[in-house]
Amino acid sequence: MKSTSRNLPLRIGLGLSLLLLALAVFGPSLAAHDPLQIYKNLRINDRTYGGPPLRAVPPFETAQFPLGVDYISRDVLSRLLWAVRPTLILCGVVVAARLAVGLLIGMLAGWFGRRVGWLIDVLSVLSGAVPLLLVSIGILIALDGRNSLPIFTLALALTGWLNVATIVQSRIQTVLHAPYIESAQAIGQRPHGIFWRHVMPQVWPALPMVIAAELSATTLLIAELGYLGFYIVGGYTYTDSTRDGPTPDIVKEAAGQPELGQMLSDFFGQYNRTPWVNIWAGLVVVLMLCAFTLLSEGLRRELDVTRPRAARWWTWR
Amino acid sequence: MFRLLLRKLFLLILLVPLLHASGFFYALRYQPVHIIYQGNLPSGFTLDNPGPDFSSTYGEYLQNLRQGDWGKTERTPLTSYVPRFINRSLILTGFALLATLGLGPLLALLAISRQTGRVSSAALTVFTLGTALPGFFLGTLLIVVILLATRWGWFAKLPLPVQGYGFDKHLILPVLVLAARPVLYVAYVTAGLLEHEFQQDYIRVAKGKGLRWRQLLWRHALPNVAAAMITTLGRSLQLVIGGLVLVETLFDWRGIGWLMMTVVAGRADAPNYFNAPLLAMLLAIFATLLIITDLLTTLWAYLADPRLRQSAAAGRS
């Protein structure tokens, strides 16, 4: 074991996250084609490709469509480059909502102790009783929130803030039992002062790790919902008369705007003709998940006091 | 302690009927009426308040319940329709649980170095990445690889069945996909716990006395982490049950997850679609499974760790 410790997950996680951020910001300008452009009739290498009755261009066949085309013959690479942005925006909004709610309730529960803490206990048992995925699907169907960001945010944030709240609450509770809190009270500091000067500064360092972990969990949830057919962008419907899918046959929607959840959906409708769309979208989702998870693991290692560290050449003050 | 168990049991008795009623209400109220009926609304439905009146319908349902009629799906009573699905899900869950119990702690032990008691960085990274991997992506990847390999002639016929239920080779892929994340999650948490234990002073004393690794592990470290490990195993079982929906939909394994998807997001003219008694029953089943898992985990952790019994006796349970 090395005695110094380069925090490799942190570096790789940060690097990947910045890469994803760059993709979200600059991706659409890098796309070679219009993501909504349908290529009805193509002639490549002496074969005809095109929309559903004809074959679809597979990946690595031609430099014009490096990753192939999707089911109705739109360029996959351009769609992927465009798709990162809405997914990351959705992810960011949901995590911000979860953080806000979780922080508030965690602070209240931690500070006021048993009087408010029982609420979190009850809610965690409640949320442990029904799978998260089902609750999100339920809310999305009930409020018909397929195409609206606020409802999607509500559905995903309503169920995930508990983790944040629990972590914040336990941290505050640990700090409150320390002797210096008692001495602060003894010298006459107000509860307000104790809270903001002594208690909360111990909570803030844990937050980046929580944020990264929540980003990872939210991305996973968005991907799962997208796979099951619940994604955020709108689209137009077209009916597909093939019945080769064992999944319940939903009326097919070809989403207009690209989004990673949409690109993951409808695996069985597509796998005969264009199985690679799911794979490429899945790889991008895996990249996102790796980035956020490595980031959260790296931050967790930073917080671990028993880890051997090299001496710093800089100090806080 | 018994108070804690009693509280959880009480919660079970309170929560399950509540969720049952909520499921019933949800199915009656939020059925997407406009899609199915296209303007020819049957009696009791209006566009402003779609769905028959909840209290009278539920009251009727409870009356029928007294005579043992749990509702029907297309003339088959639910009491004979649903158990088949429960059995299939239980088979899947059972095997996934066995895999988690066996492989999880094993991987954690493999990751810990015998000299320093620390987890190797690489193993920790693998574990964290594994918890982030979306199981359904692994599943779709495997399915596509198997199908393409067969199409390209590498195999005469499908090496592993990719769809459907069967108590044979059909089990392999679904259990693999279902158990992937829980195994790595258990490995990750167990490795962290064991690493923390091995840094303690008493382990240093034991090593100084000359105890061998195996004795250190089985006599000293493991009993101390037993309670936390059991809690993690319980949480991973809850993860498995939560993942049933996605995995069963992917592999056409007709269990309760698959049934839930057909009820909520299936074909609109299917007999199961938004079938109120069925939806309520499925929700109640999920809740029962999860809460009983939680209960059994708490009980087992209590039996395994004397410290919990002590703190309970001191009145803090």
Image (cartoon, rainbow, N blue to C red):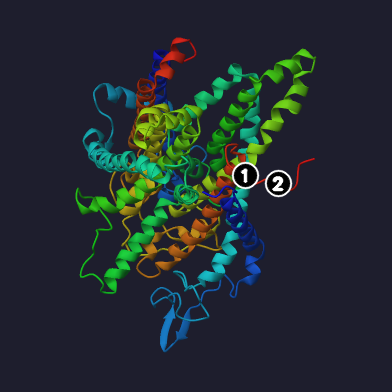
- The reply, left or right, for residue A97 in relation to residue B102 is right
Parent chain of label 1: A
Mark 1 and mark 2 in contact (Cβ < 8 Å)?
A: yes
Say few, some or many: other residues with alpha carbon within 10 Å of mark 2 (under 14 / 14 to 19 / 20 or more): few
Left or right of A115 on screen, residue B281:
left
Residue A64, given in percent of the width and then of the height, sits at 53, 80
Front residue of this view, candidates B144 and B308? B308
Q: What residue occupies the far bottom of the structure in this picture?
A: A46
Q: Is residue B195 above or below residue B14?
A: below
Q: Which residue is depicted at the point 32% across and 50% down?
A: B176
Residue that appears at 71% across and 32% down: A201
State which chain disc 2 sits on. Answer: A
Q: Which mark is residue A312?
A: 2
Residue type at numbered disc 1:
Arg
Q: Is residue B187 left or right of residue A310?
A: left
SS category of the residue bearing label 2: loop
